[in-house]
Structures are given as C-alpha cells and as structure tokens.
Image (cartoon, rainbow, N blue to C red):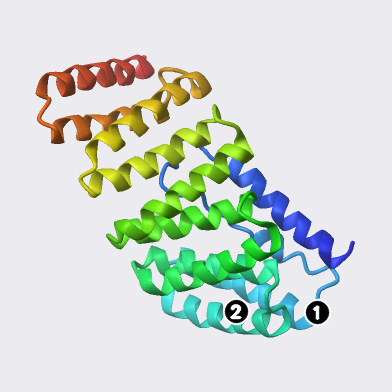
C-alpha cells in the first residue's frame, strides 16, 4: 500500500466518523484519526511512524487526565511530522488532534491557531467540499463559539453548512446539527429570528431523518424553547416544553 493509500484510509476513517456520528453528539464533528495514523506498516518514514505512535500515547495520557505529559508528546510528535510532511494532509490531521487537546482545556487561542493551519492544508488538498475540511471548519467555528467570538464563528458555521449540504444532501440529520450550531451562534448574537428559523428547519429535517421522538429532535426543541423564551413568547414556549416532555415520557416507556 502506498503512502497515498494511507491518506485515503485516514480520509475514509474521518468520513465514517462524520456520517455515523451518534445523535447525542451535537456539539462537534470530531475527526479522530490517531488510531488510523498508527498503522506503521504503511510506507511512511521511521520518524513519522514514531511520531504517530507518540501522538497516540499523548491521546491516551490526555484521556487519563495527564495533560502536562500529553502536551510534551503532542508537541514532539507535531514537530517531527511537520519536518517530514510539511503541507501534507497527515500533518493537518495531527494539527487537528492537538487542537482538540487544547480546546478541551479551554485554550482556545492555541486551538484556533492549529485548526487554521489544518484548514489551510485541507483546503489546498481537497477544497471545502470534503469531510476532513468540513470537520475542521466546524471544529474551528466551535472553538470561536466557546471563546465567545461569535462574529468569527458565524461565517465558518455557514461555510460548514454549505459543505455539509453538498456532502450529505439537504435532508441528512447532519444538516440539522449544522443548523443547530448556526442557530446557537445567532442566538448568542441576539439574532433570534434567524436562530428560530434555523432551528425550525433543523427540527423538520431531524423529524424526517431520525424520527419525531429522537434525541436530536428533543435537543433542537430545547434550543428553540430558549429562543422563544428570550422573545418573551411565554405561551409558545410552554406549549413547546409540553411537547418536548411528551416525547421524553414516550421514550421512557
């Protein structure tokens, strides 16, 4: 298998992650390619193979709460991969993974820098309409949203939505998730009418794609209730709350 085949394997792994994401995972489309990258039988250089092993070890340390040790390995791994594969999609995947590590620690500026570098590589390699690119667009937007940089998050979420519609089709549940992210951004900007419209569209898509009683529908309804309440429309909010509770009660039976 060639090194290009390794890149294809990584891309397929990310595609599978994006298309089969569990419904409760509404906040991020994560690309976790560390496991795929540790396939050292592929014809990559020894330095890169060792670096990818280090990245996997760093991920394990981070999961154990050993963040300081994980960061040392992440930095060593990233430096080695960048030296051997500058501008390569495999480097972009590693940049994304380290950015995820920083984001989990609320180190948003550091995460955004790495996501931006990964995005530049993916756009140059694949364009916007690719699962890897779309994933990093959404990850970067989510970082800005968490950092309360709503004006930076909003155009990225629009860009991610456009890419997702081309990749998944307009009726895929992933579009409902993208609309939810955009609506959350607009809600925090005080743009309630836009948020309401996006959530209603997302609910309609989710009901068809995942069923009217799905966890995704419940989540979107909950966000819509927040928007309606912020508008002072108490009766509508109460009706939506009752509808949501009925779905929850039904799912418990």
In the displayed structure, 86 sits above or below 136; it is below
Crowding around mark 1 (Cα neighbors within 10 Å: few <14, some 14 to 19, many 20+) is some
In the displayed structure, 88 sits above or below 155; it is below
**Left or right, 138 with reference to 38:** left
Residue, disc 1: 45
Residue, disc 2: 78
In the displayed structure, 175 sits above or below 186; it is above
Quadrant for the C terminus, please. top left
Which secondary structure lies at badge 1? loop
Which secondary structure lies at badge 2? helix
Residue 220 lies in quadrant:
top left
Which one is earlier in the sequence, the residue at label 2 or at label 1? 1
Quadrant for the N terminus, please. bottom right
Q: Position of residue 7 (x, y in %)?
A: 76, 61
**Left or right, 198 with reference to 30:** left
What residue is drawn where x is 21% and y is 22%?
241
Cβ–Cβ under 8 Å for marks 2 and 1? no
Q: Position of residue 84 (x, y in %)?
A: 73, 82
| Residue extending farthest right | 1
- Residue 175 visible (yes or no): yes
């Amino acid at each position: 298998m060639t090194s290009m085949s390794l890149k294809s394997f990584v891309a397929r792994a990310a595609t599978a992650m994006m298309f089969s994401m569990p419904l409760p995972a509404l906040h991020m489309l994560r690309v976790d390619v560390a496991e795929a990258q540790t396939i050292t039988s592929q014809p990559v250089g020894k330095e890169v193979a060792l670096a990818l092993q280090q990245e996997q070890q760093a991920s394990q340390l981070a999961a154990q709460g050993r963040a300081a040790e994980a960061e040392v390995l992440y930095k060593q791994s990233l430096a080695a991969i960048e030296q051997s594969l500058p501008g390569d999609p495999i480097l972009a995947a590693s940049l994304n993974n380290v950015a995820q590590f920083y984001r989990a620690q609320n180190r948003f500026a550091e995460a955004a820098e790495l996501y931006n570098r990964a995005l530049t590589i993916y756009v140059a390699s694949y364009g916007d309409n690719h699962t890897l690119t779309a994933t990093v667009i959404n990850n970067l937007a989510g970082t800005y949203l968490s950092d309360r940089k709503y004006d930076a998050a909003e155009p990225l979420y629009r860009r991610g939505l456009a890419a997702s519609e081309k990749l998944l089709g307009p009726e895929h549940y992933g579009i409902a998730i993208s609309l939810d992210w955009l609506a959350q951004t607009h809600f925090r900007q005080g743009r309630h009418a836009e948020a309401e419209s996006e959530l209603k569209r997302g609910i309609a898509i989710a009901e068809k794609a995942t069923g009217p009683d799905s966890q995704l529908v419940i989540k979107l309804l909950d966000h819509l209730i927040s928007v309606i309440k912020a508008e002072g429309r108490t009766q509508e909010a109460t009706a939506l709350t009752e509808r949501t509770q009925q779905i929850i009660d039904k799912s418990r039976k």
